[in-house]
Structures are given as structure tokens and as C-alpha cells.
Amino acid sequence: MPNLKAPRAATLAAWAALALAGLWASGGAATTNGLANGGFETAAADAGQVAAGWLTAPTGNPAQWSDDAHTGSHSALLTVPDGFGASTLFQDSQGNLPALSAANVGDTPLLTFWDKGDASTTGNANFWLRYMGAGGILLDSGAQSFGDSLSPGNWTQLSFQGAPIPAGTTSVMLEITTAVGPLLDGRANAVYVDDIQLALTTAAVPEPSSCALLLAGLVTVGAIARRRHA
């Protein structure tokens, strides 16, 4: 007569194994800000930084640390007060996160930030999102203008969905630039940015307690199967 209990126990074990796999899969992914100090609250630690984590062009019109903030106490000010030139702010995600890997391929980072100011009638305000690899730039978003969203007295949030991350990408670089020349109408070229977020997906690891509980269940099911089989 066939032993029906053993197949049943094997079925239970199979379901438990699938549940364990599902736990790892359900861990899925977590979202991490790829840019450090996105609120510009931490002061610069090194020369060439407008604030911790953020670099600025060493010549021309370096970005400034401003106390005119969307939230908190500080923002970054990109300004060309002399009426001709550019002011640039940039950061590479690898300064904040481990190098991106094959697990990030296909991910579409979401960039958001708040802006305020005036690029003047003879200026512009742009940003670039660049995917970097061992050989340099793998993919470039091209200049994305946000001058139309600027208001001298009000903060406005801007959102940009990046392209899928290509294979070989080790980091994502953000560059924000305002340029003008010359000022003809007396309007200042001054652009404030704050609360910058670059949402990158990273692999999530299940809680150790959850794994331990499910593994204990697998052991129990295995013991039941052996006892019934005997």
C-alpha cells in the first residue's frame, strides 16, 4: 500500500522552500538617495566644495552656500553676479554609495529637487544626469532646462525620470548649471536649489529574524517528514 503521508510531508517542505524564496524576493528592493547632503545642511569640508559632498567649479563663479532654504537652514546658490559666465554644482553618487552593479541595470532613477530664483532674460538654468562607467560617460541625459520653473519668490519642485541604467554603470553624476551673458536688463542671474534627491534602487535583505523563523519551520517540516516516512 502506498505511503500517502510521505508525499504530503514532501509537499509541505516544498511549500516552505517556496515561502523562503518568496521572502527573499519580497525583500525586493529599497530606495536610497544617491546624493549625499541633498539639503546642503552640512558645511563644506574641503576646498572646492559648496557644501559637504557637493563640488563647484574652481574658477569663474563658484556656487555658494546660502541661508535662503526651502527646508532646514541652507541651500546652494548658483549665481553669476558680474553678468557673464557660468556657475556649476555637481556630485557623483559613488561619493555616497558603493559602486553600482549589475543589480542596478535597468533601474530608472528619479531625480527631484526644489528651485527658486531668476536666470535672467539672457541666461539659462540646466541640469544633466550622467551614467558613469570605467571608461567615462556611458549615457548622458543631455541638457534639461528648468529655467521656466523658476520663480524669484517661490520654491518649485522639479521631477525628472532618468533613463534605464545601462550595463557597466558604476555611478550616477548630477550636474546643475546656470549661465548668462551679458546681463542686459538688470535682472540678477541667481538660482537656488535645495532638497535634492536621486532615488536609486538597491537590493534589500530580509530581516534576520524573519529568515530564522522560516528556516526553523523548514527544519520542523523536515523532521515531520522523516518521522512519517519511518
Image: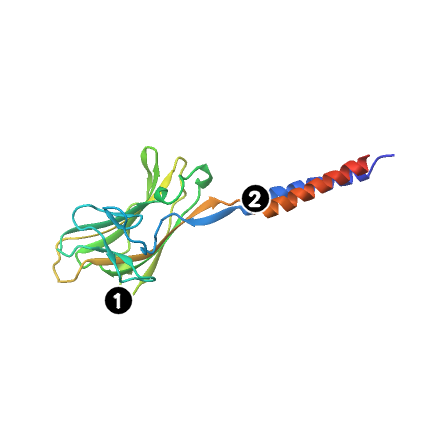
Tag 2, which secondary structure?
Answer: helix
Residue 39 numbered tag: none
Farthest residue in the top direction?
135
Specify the amino acid type for callout 2. Ala
Q: Position of residue 175 (x, y in %)?
A: 28, 47
Q: Position of residue 212 (x, y in %)?
A: 62, 44
Q: How far separated are the C-alphas under marks 1 and 2? A: 47 Å
Q: Are marks 1 and 2 in contact (CB under 8 Å)?
A: no
Specify the amino acid type for callout 1. Gly
Can residue 19 be spotted in the picture? Answer: no
The image quadrant that residue 15 belongs to is top right
Residue at position x 29%, y 45% from top? 142
Can residue 154 be spotted in the picture? Answer: yes
Q: Position of residue 71 (x, y in %)?
A: 34, 62
Residue at position x 40%, y 48% from top? 109
Label 1 neighbour load within 10 Å: few <14, some 14-19, many 20+:
few
Going from N to C along the chain, the mark reached first, 1 or 2, is 2
Tag 1, which secondary structure?
Answer: loop
Which residue is under mark 1?
Answer: 153
Residue 25 numbered tag: 2
Q: Is residue 98 left or right of residue 83?
A: right
Q: Position of residue 200 (x, y in %)?
A: 42, 47
Residue at position x 72%, y 42% from top? 220
Q: Quadrant of the N terminus?
A: top right
Query: Which sits in the foreground, 192 or 75?
Result: 75
Farthest residue in the bottom direction?
153
